[in-house]
């Protein structure tokens, strides 16, 4: 009999006291209700790896909603329940926990969302993507902290291996192709030989996945610390070409992503900024194809189109001593992420400086006087007001007026 690993002290040391105490309370309640309760998935993997992860996923053998309702009386906060899925989310203070009824899944056809039914923990774990994500921990008071490892996740974790549970895994759900690549690069693991073979063999199954779900996978890639690594691997495996054949994960891209992170620090670059950089070399037709494939929301589609339009103005922006008002006229109205993508993408130092001037200063400038102020001075309301405001803005951009008095004098003139 292999020795059972107990992670109680890891739970107490690695997780905030509030979360550890929640799990103990939940384990006790579940036991009183005669239900089995387990901590599962990514948080178990990361506990074993010593990596920070506070996203608690609990699986209940029985009825997760019944447990969540009881639990919400102890940890008072917001309880959201989803009866259709048998899941609940409890949020209190700055914390949250997801509870799900153990379920098994069947796939009516490849790529379709699975149909589910309540089941055991073992069934629930066997529907998961990779062995390293199948480990669970007992939360029942009598066995609190004991590791459940039905698919040798612990061995694979130690050997730094990403392994699917069965041969049809990528056929059932090809989003696992992107997930596998992401884990491989995030954790610096490697896709196990047979898993890699299956992945390559089943790449065409990505065609069975809706654009919305692929977009979600790409969003997850962009939330990684270094998305360029996953994109590079995706290119190598022929997965990036499935997004669009014109996409490339070059060293140019890696370098631009790094600069984008510096720009955005302490936040991560937004999805649209990363996407605008990734698609920067694409022409307008190729971008339209990607927009429709990924079913991109309108503002993000606009960013990609804006980026192309700005690119066609780069020659005009690459002039020395360009009047600030001219720079403003060229760039005003475009999505900021599209402007930033061009700052990163342009090879011209002059264009870069002008774009930077716009981003850091010009786009924030406004005349002190408002339309109402102008009407108060006796100018009749109508199109004339707009014209004067435009002239005031132009003068302000070009440094011809700075104070309110300057603006009033200009209006008089
Ligand atoms: P992360 O992977 O970002 O660290 P996580 O491991 O918690 O977080 P989620 O995407 O939140 O991953 O999913 C939770 C768990 O659900 C995973 O650990 C995995 O076991 C399972 N899972 C998620 N997506 C799939 C999928 N497409 N196929 C099978 N199992 C999945």
Image (cartoon, grey):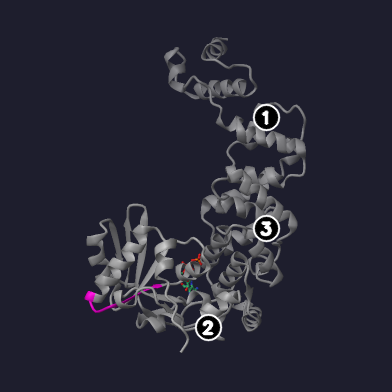
Above or below for 372 versus 346: above
Residue positioned 62% across, 49% down in the render: 261
What range is drawn magenta here?
Answer: 32-39
Where, by quadrant of the figure, is residue 223 drawn? bottom right
Number of marks: 3
Coordinates of residue 193 in the picture (x, y in percent): 66, 82
Closer to viewer: mark 3 or mark 1? 1
Label of residue 142 in the image:
none
Coordinates of residue 123 in the picture (x, y in percent): 41, 84
* Left or right of 318 in this view: 334: left
Return the residue at label 1. 326
Residue 82 in view here: no
Instruction: Return the disc, 3 or 1, that comes first in the chain's sequence.
Output: 3
Closer to viewer: mark 1 or mark 2? 2
Return the residue at label 2. 165
Above or below for 291 versus 180: above
Return the residue at label 3. 285
Q: Residues within 10 Å of mark 2 (few under 14, many from 20)?
A: some
């Amino acid at each position: 009999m292999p020795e059972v690993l107990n992670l109680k002290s890891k739970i107490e040391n690695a997780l905030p006291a509030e979360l550890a105490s929640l799990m103990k309370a939940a384990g006790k309640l579940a036991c009183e209700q005669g239900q089995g309760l387990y901590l599962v998935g990514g948080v178990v993997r990361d506990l074993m790896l010593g990596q920070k992860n506070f996203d608690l996923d609990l699986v209940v053998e029985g009825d997760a909603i019944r447990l969540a309702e009881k639990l919400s009386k102890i940890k008072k906060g917001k309880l959201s329940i989803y009866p259709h899925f048998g899941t609940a989310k409890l949020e209190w203070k700055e914390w949250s926990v997801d509870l799900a009824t153990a379920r098994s899944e069947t796939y009516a056809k490849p790529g379709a969302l699975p149909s589910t039914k309540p089941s055991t923990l073992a069934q629930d774990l066997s529907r998961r993507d990779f062995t390293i994500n199948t480990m669970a921990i007992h939360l029942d008071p009598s066995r609190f902290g004991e590791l459940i490892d039905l698919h040798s996740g612990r061995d694979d974790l130690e050997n730094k291996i990403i392994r699917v549970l069965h041969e049809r895994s990528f056929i059932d759900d090809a989003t696992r192709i992107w997930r596998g690549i992401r884990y491989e690069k995030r954790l610096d693991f490697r896709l196990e030989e047979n898993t890699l073979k299956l992945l390559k063999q089943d790449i065409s199954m990505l065609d069975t996945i809706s654009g919305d779900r692929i977009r979600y996978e790409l969003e997850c890639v962009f939330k990684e610390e270094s998305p360029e690594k996953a994109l590079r691997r995706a290119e190598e495996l022929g997965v990036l070409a499935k997004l669009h054949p014109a996409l490339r994960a070059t060293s140019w891209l890696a370098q631009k992503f790094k600069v984008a992170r510096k720009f955005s620090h302490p936040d991560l670059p937004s999805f649209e900024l990363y996407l605008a950089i990734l698609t920067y070399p694409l022409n307008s037709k190729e971008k339209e194809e990607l927009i429709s494939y990924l079913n991109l929301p309108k503002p993000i589609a606009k960013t990609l189109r804006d980026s192309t339009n700005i690119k066609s103005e780069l020659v005009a922006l690459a002039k020395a001593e360009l009047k600030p008002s001219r720079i403003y006229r060229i760039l005003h109205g475009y999505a900021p992420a599209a402007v930033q993508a061009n700052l990163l993408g342009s090879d011209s130092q002059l264009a870069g400086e002008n774009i930077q001037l716009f981003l850091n200063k010009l786009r924030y400038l406004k005349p002190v006087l408002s339309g109402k102020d102008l009407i108060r001075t006796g100018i009749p309301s109508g199109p004339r007001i707009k014209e004067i405001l435009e002239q005031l803005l132009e003068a302000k951009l070009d440094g011809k007026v700075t104070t309110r008095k300057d603006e009033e004098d200009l209006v008089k003139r």
